[in-house]
Image: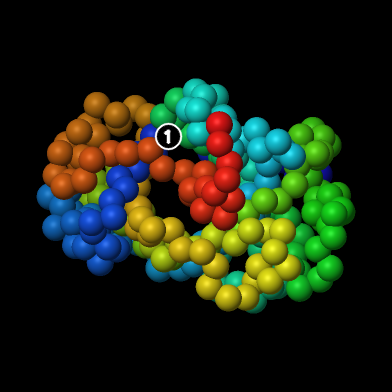
Amino acid sequence: MQEGRYSEYRFERKFVTSRIDHKGLEQIVRIHPALFNEIYWERQVNNIYFDTPGLSYYFDNVVGKSQRRKVRIRWYGEDNGLIEHPVLEFKIKSGSLGRKASFDLAPLDLRADVNFDFFDRHFQASSIPENVLEELKGLKPFLLNKYRRRYYRSADHNFRFTIDFDLRYFDFSDVSITIGTGKKDLVNSILELKYDQELDDQASEITQHLPIRMGKSSKYVNGIDIIRNNLAV
């Protein structure tokens, strides 16, 4: 059984706007006085989100509970139905702080018959600890989302920006989830600032140079709202 990887808590501040596209956000980051440079490479991020049958995780996020979580399978790169390196992630939030617990999964083929116990069988075959398997019981996939992401880091390596754009959502109950363009997010570009919790006193030096106000945004909540617009708290 694998032990999993657990990140430290960090702040994740989101800046959401419909006035500035991702090219404009890139320009804002490039001229920032903290001298952000691009790291890694632009890539596609893909997620399958799981929830209880009553969408408990969704509603916890909507009402703004301090302690909340999301459960997802994440992978990177273009989606052709065959996922060679999927990762199971528990995204755990405590107020404005977030951390992740990650577990490697066996290769996943979404071109197969994704029936009601498809993911249960896959989790069982992926050497996930028993306590994690127990937590996954009763969860079902609701949403697939895809977006492009670019990564930047300040010259002192203390702060990171990510820019997410071309956000698309797919109802996982739709048999054609891996084809077509999905439903687009009308905001469709998100700037996110990430930093360790001990640096919070310095964060204002970064945010004061942004022409966008910090806001609340959850891709999972936005996606559920878009594909199932009849939900209400």
Residue nearer the viewer, 80 or 10:
80
Q: Which residue sits furthest top?
A: 66
Q: Is residue 80 above or below residue 5?
A: below
Q: Quarter of the image holding residue 152?
A: bottom left
Please tell me which residue lies in front, 20 or 198: 20
Q: Secondary structure at mark 1?
A: strand
* Residue 6 left/right relative to 138: left
Q: Is residue 198 above or below residue 157?
A: above
Determine whether, in the image, residue 207 is placed left or right of residue 104.
left
Residue 2: x %, y % from top left: 75, 45
Quarter-of-image position of residue 102: top right
What's the colour scheme? rainbow
Q: Quadrant for the C terminus, please.
A: top right
> Residue at the spot x=41%, y=43% of the render?
217
Q: Amino acid at mark 1?
A: Arg
> Residue 109, relative to residue 206: is it above or below?
below
- Label 1: how many Cα within 10 Å (few below 14, some 14–19, many 20+): many
